[in-house]
Amino acid sequence: MAKQLIQPPNGPKPGGAYSPGLRAGDFIFVAGQGPTNPATGAVGETIEEQTTQVLENIRTILEAGGATMADVVKATVHLSDLSLFPRYNAVYATYFPDPKPVRTTVGSQLLNILVEIDVIAYVGDR
């Protein structure tokens, strides 16, 4: 199966030369998503608001590809400040049923945002 673009019309628009999501075989790869609301362009101020929007952006892309948050097997998270981890983690935990995806969380220099997340979902032969 060739890779297939996933770019929902109501989803986040790429900020550069990349695809928001790709299906390749049994997997969906979602590019790093920031906290911009695709409908309004607004970015929340708190880590809770930004984490929620990032995960909603991811959900939109996954759903356009026929997946759910329950299908996510791997997440990579970039935080602008690792002291935000407990607050970010509290929001993150509400988006994924058990067993939660494996995850890597790192401190990163981010441009005017607090969090960015990319995920990989396993969808089998759906």
Image (tube, rainbow, N blue to C red):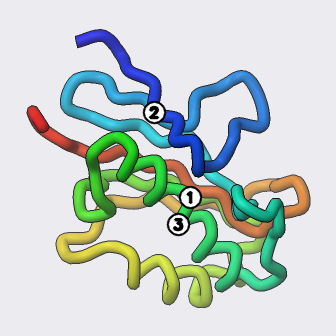
Q: Residue at x 32, y 73 (%)?
A: 96
The answer for how far apart the CA atoms under marks 2 and 1 are is: 12 Å
Q: What residue type is labelled 3?
A: Glu
The crowding category of the residue bearing disc 3, from other C-alpha atoms within 10 Å (few below 14, some 14 to 19, many at least 20), is some
Residue 92 visible in the snapshot: yes
Q: In which quarter of the image is the C terminus?
A: top left
Mark pair 2, 3: CA separation: 15 Å
Residue 6's disc is 2
**How much space separates mark 3 and mark 1, taking CA atoms?**
4 Å
Instruction: Indicate the secondary structure of the residue bearing disc 1.
Output: helix
Lower sequence index among marks 2 and 3: 2
Query: Are the residues at dot 3 and dot 1 in contact (C-beta closer than 8 Å)?
Result: yes
Image quarter where the N terminus lies is top left
Q: Name the residue under label 3.
A: 56
Could you tell me which secondary element the residue under label 3 belongs to?
helix
Quadrant assignment, res 23 = top left
Frontmost residue, 82 versus 6: 6
Asked if one can make out residue 107 in the rendered structure from this viewpoint, the answer is no
In front here: 108 or 123? 123
Q: Residue at x 71, y 60 (%)?
A: 39
Label 2 CA crowd tier, 10 Å (few <14, some 14–19, many 20+):
many
Kind of residue indicated by mark 1: Asn
Residue at the left extreme of this rendering: 125
At 82% from the left edge and 54% from the top edge, which residue is drawn? 109
Residue under pointer 1: 57
Which amino acid type is marked by label 2? Ile
**Kind of element beneath mark 2:** strand
* Viewer-nearest residue: 122 or 53: 53
Q: Is residue 42 above or below residue 85?
A: above
Q: Where is residue 11 in the image (x, y as percent from the top left)?
A: 59, 49
